């Protein structure tokens, strides 16, 4: 798995990014921070204490908050280089 997307069911930005990633055939794992409250701590640590979603956390430990699909693809390319 290339990255984990932390999300909530009501997040419009999350739904949009998911559909774009699906269209591009990019695999990812979803974690709903409302269903898994301990995951909210991961999101907070990446966002200066805020529960901002979508937050993507990559295999190298870096994170992006509300990235575009182009930013995600660039990050994945950098990781695979």
Image (cartoon, grey):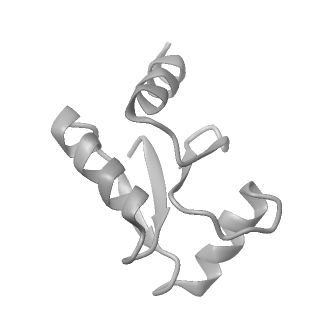
Task: Find the residue positioned furthest to the right.
Answer: 48
In the picture shown, does residue 58 fall above or below 79?
below
Instruction: State the image coordinates of residue 63 (x, y, percent, origin top left).
Output: 64, 45
Instruction: State the image coordinates of residue 28 (x, y, percent, origin top left).
Output: 35, 50
Query: Which residue is pictured at 35% across the width and 48% down the height?
Result: 17
In the picture shown, does residue 79 fall above or below 3?
above
The quarter holding residue 77 reads: top left
Query: Which residue is pictured at 64% across the width and 75% down the height?
Result: 40
In the picture shown, does residue 19 fall above or below 40?
above
In the figure, is residue 5 to the left or right of 16?
right
The quarter holding residue 10 reads: bottom left
In the figure, is residue 9 to the left or right of 56?
left
Query: Which residue is pictured at 31% across the width and 60% down the height?
Result: 15
The quarter holding residue 24 reads: top left
Instruction: State the image coordinates of residue 6 (x, y, percent, origin top left).
Output: 50, 63
Q: How many marks?
A: 0
Query: Which residue is pictured at 81% across the width and 68% down the height?
Result: 49
Task: Find the residue positioned furthest to the top.
Answer: 81
Instruction: State the image coordinates of residue 16 (x, y, percent, origin top left).
Output: 31, 52
Pick whichever, 70 or 2, lies toward us: 70
């Amino acid at each position: 798995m290339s990255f984990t997307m932390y999300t909530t069911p009501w997040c419009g930005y999350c739904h949009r990014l998911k559909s774009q990633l699906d269209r591009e055939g990019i695999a990812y794992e979803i974690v709903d921070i409302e269903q898994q409250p301990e995951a909210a701590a991961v999101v907070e640590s990446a966002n200066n204490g805020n529960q901002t979603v979508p937050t993507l956390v990559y295999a190298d430990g870096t994170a992006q908050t509300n990235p575009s699909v182009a930013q995600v693809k660039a990050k994945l390319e950098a990781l695979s280089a």
